Each structure stands twice: as C-alpha cells, then as structure tokens.
Image: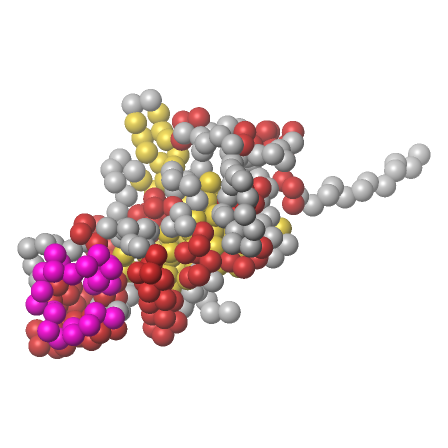
Amino acid sequence: MSPPLLEVRDLVVEFPNRRGTLRALDGVSFSIAPGEVLGMVGESGAGKSLTGAAIIGLLAPPGRIARGAILLEGARIDRLAPEALRRIRGRRIGAIFQDPLTTLNPLYTIGRQLTETIRTHLPLSAAEARAQAIHWLDEVGIPAAARRIDAYPHEFSGGQRQRVVIALALCAEPRLVIADEPTTALDVSIQAQIIALLKRLAREHTTAVLLITHDMGVIAETADRVAVMYAGRIAEIGPVAQVIRSPGHPYTAGLMASIPALEHRVARLAQIEGSMPRLDAIPPGCAFNPRCPRAFDRCHAERPDLMPAGATDAACWLHAPAPAATSPAHA
C-alpha cells in the first residue's frame, strides 16, 4: 500500500451564529492514496461539498475548522496562512466544480485562462505555457486543440466546457483533485466520457481524486472506494464493490435499495422514510436512528464510531462486538 497522499483526521467544521454554534462536520476521517479515486456520496446537506471546501481552504465565513487535521503528503495544510494555502491551490490541489461557467471567465479565452494558471504555478515562458495548455486540451479530448485554444467559453458545448475545467484543474499537475459534482449538469453520454477521463488521468498521473456526488451510479463506475456520508459524519467507508453488494449500514442499504434495477420491474422504488435532520436538531445517539428500520435502544443513546463491518467499516451498533462472557465469581 502506498502512503496516503491526503489524510483527513477527525475533522470538525462549525458555523457560529447568534443562537450558538452549528456543527456541520463532526469527526470526519479518511485517506486517499496516490492514483486512487475515493467517492463521497450522500443526500444533499450530508456534508460532502463542505468536506471538499474545508480541504482546499474555501469554507464560507463564518465557517471554521474547529478541530482535526488535514495532511497533504504528510504535511498539515489546515493551519496555513491564506496566502500559503492559495499557492497550494492549483499547484498541488486542483478543483473541478459542477458548473463550468462558475469556473471559467467568459471575458477571457480558454487559452489565456490556462496559460495564466500554468505560469502562476510553473516556471515556464509564455510560449512554453501555451504549448502546455494545448497539450492539456488534447489530453482531455478537446478536438483541434491548437485551433480552439483562442476560443471563448461560450463557444464550447457544456461537455467541452467541463473538459476545459478539468484541463484547468490539472494543468499545473496537482497531486490531488477535488471533483465536486463534476457530471451533474451533463447528459448521460457526456457523463460517461467525463468519468472515463477522470479514471484515466488518475491512473496515468497517479493523481488522487476525491469525487463528490449524490449519484451512486457515477461512484460505481469511477471510484475505487466510497465514503457514505450522513448528517456530517461518515456512515460507511470501504471498497466500492463491497459497499454496493453488501452494505454494512442501514442508511447505505437504503441508498442501494432506492436505485432501480434493470433485471426486473417493480411497481414502486424503495425509499428511506423521513429526511435528514437539521444541524440544530440532530438526535442523540446515531443520527440516523429516527429513520432506521433496525434501530434499537443503544442507537438512541450512544453515537457509534466506524467499526469493522465485513469488508467495510460502518458506524452502526449492529456490528459492535458481543460483550465478553464473564466467569462466575468464586466464593
């Protein structure tokens, strides 16, 4: 096993307000190895995008990291000054967001945006940076890249704009890429192309990828491992095939059951009753207990941490080891 490229340890993110403090992430821990794609999935509000924002130092005020550590190649980055963190973004950490139009400046050609990014982070001349920009446009599958480098974002289709955003995220050759819902706004055929592209780039450049999405199909096609989030915590994490085939947490099982199967037709898809709790109304014990069909007394009283659940780790008391038998007392 390669040493982790990214380590997140016991990450807590809070949002102070007039009524107190809301805890949006509560003890999130995971790692990603070089060349690995870790998928992060869950309902809206689970904390997926917030985890990515905390890693790249883009928490919206008044959000703050209250506890924990974020290590990139063994060095902590969560305590860096804003200017030092800005230098890391782009050079060592790239970001791909859902809507390419929020990333690309409509007033500048894509060539200018790529070359400026490259020259900001790499010691290259203007001509060398332009050649590198054309190379990356070729790499992500933009046809006639040498001719189209001087085009503006509006001259590209939605799928091509997302490819340009991927080129922009990778052009300074970062070691880690945070991809937040990179395929949501695209049609299915373009989604498949972007998924294949991310997998290939991770493999060929040994880039670690954190793929944030609500789409379990995208996770199944792309990720090596998957972390399932619920109410600001990781409910289950493990190899993607194992999580899909034999989920260890009732929430993960509910997500899997809600995906339509091609083998047989059903009158009604399974659903998880209820909704995720608000940050100011998370119940005691396991946060999923009001919606869980298998909850028992301990689930309402104690919060479980991740524990072995077959081939995965799940934060669920169903997998707690049985208490050791005690020998009878002797007179």
Q: Residue furthest left?
A: 107
Along the viewing direction, whichever of 168 and 11 lies nearer the viewer: 168
Q: Residue furthest right?
A: 331
Which range is magenta?
141-164
> Looking at the picture, how far across and down is residue 2, in whole percent?
47, 69
| Location of residue 86 (image quadrant) | bottom left
> Looking at the picture, how far across and down is residue 82, in whole percent?
21, 50
**Residue at x-position 27% and y-position 56%:** 96
Along the viewing direction, whichever of 304 and 244 lies nearer the viewer: 244
Q: Is residue 313 left or right of 50 when viewed as pictured? A: right
Coloring scheme used = secondary structure
In reply to whether residue 233 is colored magenta, the answer given is no
On the question of residue 168 being in view, the answer is no
Q: Is residue 64 above or below residue 172?
A: above
> Looking at the picture, how far across and down is residue 324, in whole percent?
77, 44
In reply to whether residue 148 is colored magenta, the answer given is yes
**Residue at x-position 85% and y-position 41%:** 327
